[in-house]
Amino acid sequence: MDLAAHRGRVVLLDFWASWCGPCRMMMPALNRVAERFRAQGLTVIGLTDDPPEVVRGVGSRMGIRYTLASSPGAMARYGVQSLPTLVMIDRAGRVRSVSVGFESPAALEQAVTALVNERP
């Protein structure tokens, strides 16, 4: 996954796995945030080490409307050790926050609002 292609947008990386209950609990909130802030410059990407067929199944069953990607080794490359892990990247491509564990929908929305409202 080439994040440089998203420069100029706020990117929320969600590291998840199909077997992770808290990860699946986060998905509806991520769906809402992705839909609400897409026009303001937010891109949400769910990355997992799960095989593509598992990713497609989860995305279909849960009605996911943001990008889900199977990227073997992505968690190791990013140093992710616990799931879910959310990484927020600003429009300049800088990591602004990393949160591990279930993020409350209100806190997630507040953090995204702050980043999309920043001046480039």
Image (cartoon, helix red, strand yellow):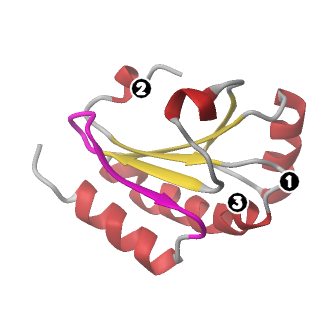
Q: Nearer the viewer, residue 50 or 30?
A: 50
Residue assigned mark 1: 19
| 69 shown above or below 59 | above
Image coordinates for residue 90, horizontal then vertical, percent: 27, 44
- Total residue callouts: 3
Q: Quadrant of the C terminus?
A: top left
* Amino acid at pointer 3: Cys
Residue for point 59% across, 65% down: 101
> Which mark, by number, is residue 68?
none
Highlighted range, magenta? 90-102
| 33 shown above or below 87 | below
Residue for point 63% across, 56% down: 84
Pointer 3: residues within 10 angstroms few (<14), some, or many (20+)? many
37 magenta-colored? no
Element under disc 1: loop
Element under disc 3: helix
Image coordinates for residue 116, horizontal then vertical, percent: 26, 55
* Amino acid at pointer 1: Trp
Residue assigned mark 3: 23
Q: Nearer the viewer, mark 2 or mark 1?
A: 1
Residue assigned mark 2: 3
State yes or no: discs 2 and 3 in contact (Cβ < 8 Å): no
| 77 shown above or below 58 | above
Pointer 1: residues within 10 angstroms few (<14), some, or many (20+)? few
Relative to 70, is 76 on the left or the right?
A: left
Element under disc 2: helix
